Image: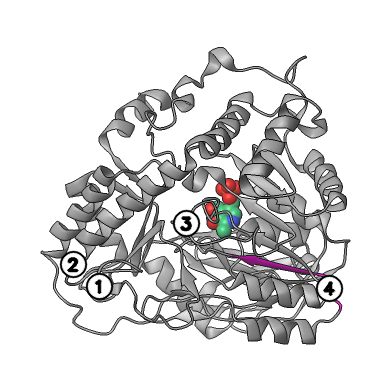
Amino acid sequence: MAQSLLELLQAACPATLPMHMPGHKRNIEMAPYLKTLAAHLDITEIKGFDHLHAAQGVLREAMEQAAAVFGANHSFFLVNGSTVGLLSAIRAVTAPGDSVLMARNCHKSVYNALALNNLRPHFIYPQTNLRYQINASMSLEDIQRAIARHREARVLIITSPTYEGVLSDLGAIIALAHRHGLTVLVDEAHGPHLGLSPHFPRGALSAGADIVIHSLHKTLPSLTQTALAHVRTPALANEMQRQLAIFETTSPSFLLLASIDGCVRLLRDRGEELFAAWAEALEAFHQKALGLRHLRVLGYGKERGLQLDNVYGLEPSKIYISTINTHISGYELAELLRGGHATEPEMITPQGVLAMTGMGDTVDSLGRLGDALLEIDSRLSPASAVKLPLMAPRVQSKVPIATAERAPFISLPLEQSEGYVMAETIVVYPPGIPVVVPGEVMNGQAISYLLAARQARNTILRTRSDVDGQVAVLRDA
Ligand SMILES: Cc1ncc(COP(=O)(O)O)c(C=O)c1O
């Protein structure tokens, strides 16, 4: 590489409209602390600066401030993303061998926590929305059935909002789970901005979740990797602290910690004004989206107010653009956005593109996105045939995940793996949710889905097999 990483960043950043994380969108006028953070301020845990894992001084005060702003009882600053929050939280609320109820569309860190703690997951699949071919909300009835079937489970883990901004009815789900004595952990990594203003829906904290994990960096003005964990009771907070000391670095970056603190203070001091400005920028996008003829935008333009099957609600910061109704794929749309409009999206699937907005977006940036879509849309024609659904299918589990992921395996061509018990996790990026995990039985639909993903040039990650086109299955199952 001839240029240094820094040189590459210096060239790319000013030239591109970031429709991806981080949510500060490089808007240093709005969040001046982000401009100031650099090596001349980089220290370690020295006198006067407290200890993240045994906070008694400035960090403790800063975390108490965060709890007050977010309406939590206890908040923890995280410098290893929501990933470390989820690993720690799951270990805090389970004992090895426990059964857990979890949404099947959880992030891979939740699956890693299962394996690390030898847990027995009982998956609850989210509903689907076929108009957009995306995961929809969790159904209360499905959760009720899972609770009745697995009375031994003590914990429920769900993700809301999803990457595309789909919300579940957390108030009803948490009340149900609490009636049955379950501890509820909500992965709200994509919704740290929820519940803080009238412009965005309420979030998991006010719905009564026991633990809530927020990736601050995804939508709010804070540096990449910064996150928060919020916990309801002092006993849980103690256990969470113990687990964070295991999973999180012992050398937390004070630049990242200062970024979290700056973000919390900005929300405290200017939150109302900044949320209103973000909502205004989203409304400007909506006005442009009304002119789209072929591209559909979830919750925007002519799609606003549509009754969507299996969708309890949407949170408006995600702009999910579907190409299902057009002659192009999500990949082609992403290329058109990059090529003609210097715009980089957050997530691309065969059937759509996610443009992620953040508090740092403006009427100008989202107007630019709207104009780009209008220009592209004017060159599109309608789809000539109905596009096949490209949703991850359901699979059945036969062997506990923690057993299967370490058991001896053989590799087979994907096409010949039907009926075999998997020895590895296979994740398709995007959206980064496992299609199969160890112990599950590969079926024909999952094979077709993976073949289609491969043909569509999605990244397919496997945890054990290393031969292209092959998958790891249990040798002795
Ligand atoms: C739903 C969900 N949870 C957790 C994470 C992990 O977040 P982080 O990258 O902050 O560790 C992600 C990352 O994309 C995610 O999509």
What is the spatial separation of the Cα atoms under label 2 and label 1, in whole angstroms? Answer: 8 Å
Check disc 1 and report the residue beneath it. 302
Crowdedness near tag 4: few (<14), some (14–19) or many (≥20) residues, C-alpha within 10 Å: few
Q: Check if mark 2's residue and mark 1's residue have beta carbons within 8 Å.
A: yes
* Magenta segment boundaries in residue numbering: 152-159
Residue 181 has which mark?
4
Residue 20 x/y as whole percent: 40, 48
In the image, 266 versus 296, the foreground residue is 266
Q: Earlier in the sequence, mark 2 or mark 1?
A: 2
Element on which disc 3 rests = loop
Q: How far is the residue under mark 4 from the one under mark 1?
A: 43 Å
Q: Is mark 4 within 8 Å of ligand 1?
A: no
Label 2–label 3 contact, CB within 8 A: no
For this rendering, which residue is in front, 429 or 187?
187
**Is 157 in the magenta?**
yes
Q: Nearer the viewer, mark 4 or mark 2?
A: 4
Along the horizontal axis of the image, is 49 left or right of 243?
left
How many neighbours does mark 3 have within 10 angstroms: few (below 14), some (14-19), or many (20 or more)?
Answer: few
Q: Quadrant of the N terminus?
A: top left
Quadrant position of residue 43: top right
Q: Amino acid at mark 2?
A: Leu
Q: Earlier in the sequence, mark 3 or mark 1?
A: 3
